[in-house]
Structures are given as C-alpha cells and as structure tokens.
Amino acid sequence: MKKTKNSADHNNRKNSIIIIKPIKKVESLTEESLRTMYILQSTLDINILIELFDHELKKMVSHDYLNYKNSVENINIDSGEIIKEKLIFNLKINNNSLGKFVIARNIKFNKWEINEIKHLMSVLVQPINNALHYRQAITNASIDPVTKLNNRTLFNKIINQEIDFAQRYEQKLLLMMLDLDNFKKINDSYGHNIGDILLSLIGKTLTEFMRRSDLVFRYGGDEFCIILRNSILDGANKLANRVRNNINEKEFDCNDIKIKISMSIGLAELRHDDDCMKFIERADKLLYKAKKAGRNNVKADVK
C-alpha cells in the first residue's frame, strides 16, 4: 500500500528526536518545578536519579515505559515495557550529548503533555550531567591509568566481599599474585614510558587468559593480582603456568623496541579460617617462593 504524504509526515514527527537543553534561568521555574529540581539534585547515583525522574514525571504525564541510554558510559536503564506511541529526547549540555530518553505508552501524547515532558527534561539536564561526572570520577578512582585494569584501591574494597561470599556459600576462591622478573632493568634501560607500555601489554595478555568472572588488578609497580572465583586449585595452577609460559615466550613490541620478560606467580586457595590478611599474605609468600626458586616460576598452595 502506498503511503500518503500526510502519513509519511506523521511517521517523521513520531520518530523525530527532541533536543533538550538545560533551563537558562532558575528564577523562571514554578514552585512545583523548583521542588522537582531539588528532588532530582538530591542524588548522584544515576539509577536512583532516573527512578526519581520517572516517579516525578508520572505525577504530570501518564506513561507505561521509560528508557535512559548512554552508549558512551554503557548505561541502559529500563522501566516498564515499550509500546506503540513513543517520544525520543536527546539531552544536551554545551553541545555534548548526555544520553537519550524514550518515553512511551499506548495512546498518543498531546501537545500539552509533550511540553510538560520537555520542561521536566530541561530540569533534569544538570542533575544528569552531575551524576555522569560523579560516575566517571568513581570509575577513574578505581582504574589504573597505565594498564586500564582495576587498581589496588578497588581490590582492597572487593577482596573482603569475595572472601565473605565464598566462605558463606562454601565456594572456591583463589588468589593469584604475579610479578614481572627484573622489571627495574627495563625502566633503567629504556625509560619509564617504555616500561608503562610493557605493563599495559602485560595487562592485556593477562585479561585475555581469564574468564569473565575473574577479576584482574594492577596491584602496584610491576605486580598484578587476579581473583579467581569458583576455580579448582589444580586447574588454576595449570592456568598460571600457561600464563607464565606465554609471557616468557612472547616478544613484546613497545614502540618498535622488542622486549622479552618473564613472570613469577604465587597461587593461594581460600581456607575456611582465612581472613583477608591471611589470604593475601599466603599468596604473597608463595610469590616470594617462586622468585627465590629462580624466577619464571609458579608456586601454589599445597592441598
């Protein structure tokens, strides 16, 4: 069936994206809008913020579905089920996109309702911007800038939770401590920039060997650690040796400088009476044994 011009225009309007920018003057807001703004500014948690916005919007305009998506920050928050009639909004501040909203229901939105949503969206822009900045700051505080791996700060936060969960539900948990052999010579010979490139390549290699459920960290300097969930000691020991062999045999290209290096590894299995300190210390002692045994070695817990 051939579409008429009016039908095509209707579809274009229905699928068009409405650009939303922040309110220019707070003084212009009604008392109700000010109240909403204060509510939305009460949190920096993006999930809670979207929930609050959804709640406030429902007081003004009925809807059955709300979605907020920010591809850059890998955020996708859904509420309800998507249905026929939808509006799409792109929130912007200083020409930077803060993500898109889809709001939908079974019946069309009238002009007054669209204006109300647009108004409330404009109140939301600054709180969304603040929440995204906060989220990024938290991420940056947990990520090592050289390797882009989780850092020691995050490890210290997570390890207690992992131990508690494993002991409570009688799950296997292993901790792998890894250290590059004679890394100082690399820095002394080629400089810290080349050393950082090598660390980054080592981090990528470790990540490639691990499962999605394993957590890889840069522990500090030339030392890494990996939390292995639901792993058996024998299997983890074989994995550690595969990692060690791979790194030992590989020639790393660091800005056209070919570098070979080896790695020593200590592998500890969580025991029922372990606390965080005991667990880490045992893995660290096993790493020291691997170093003492001539480097390029793996030392694991004895069952």
Image (tube, helix red, strand yellow):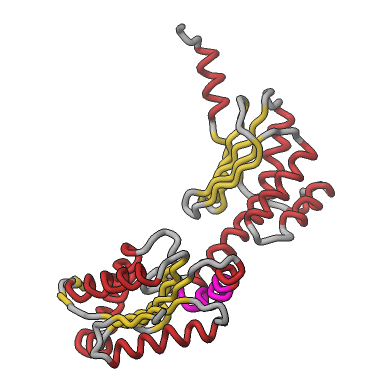
Image height of 182 relative to 18, above or below: below
* Image coordinates for residue 187, horizontal then vertical, percent: 26, 86
Residue shown at 36%/85% (left/top)? 287
Q: Report whether 264 appears left or right of 149.
A: left
Residue at the far bottom in the pictured view: 292
Image height of 146 relative to 95, above or below: below
Range shown magenta = 150-163
Give whichever of 160, 271 is nearer the camera: 271
* Image coordinates for residue 244, horizontal then vertical, percent: 26, 75
Residue at the far top in the pictured view: 1
- Residue 220, quarter of the rendered image: bottom left
Q: Classify the position of the C terminus by image quarter.
A: bottom left
How many discs mark residues in the rendered view? 0
Q: Main secondary structure of the magenta part?
A: helix
* Image coordinates for residue 78, horizontal then vertical, percent: 61, 43
Image height of 268 relative to 112, above or below: below
Give whichever of 257, 27 is nearer the camera: 257
Residue shown at 70%/49% (left/top)? 51
Q: Report whether 34 appears left or right of 4.
A: right
* Image coordinates for residue 40, horizontal then vertical, percent: 72, 54
Residue shown at 41%/86% (left/top)? 284
- Residue 286, quarter of the rendered image: bottom left
Residue shown at 56%/43% (left/top)? 100
Image height of 118 relative to 26, above or below: above
Q: Report whether 45 appears left or right of 133.
A: right
Residue at the far right in the pictured view: 31
Give whichever of 152, 271 is nearer the camera: 271
Asked if residue 31 is among those painted magenta in the image, a careful observer would answer no
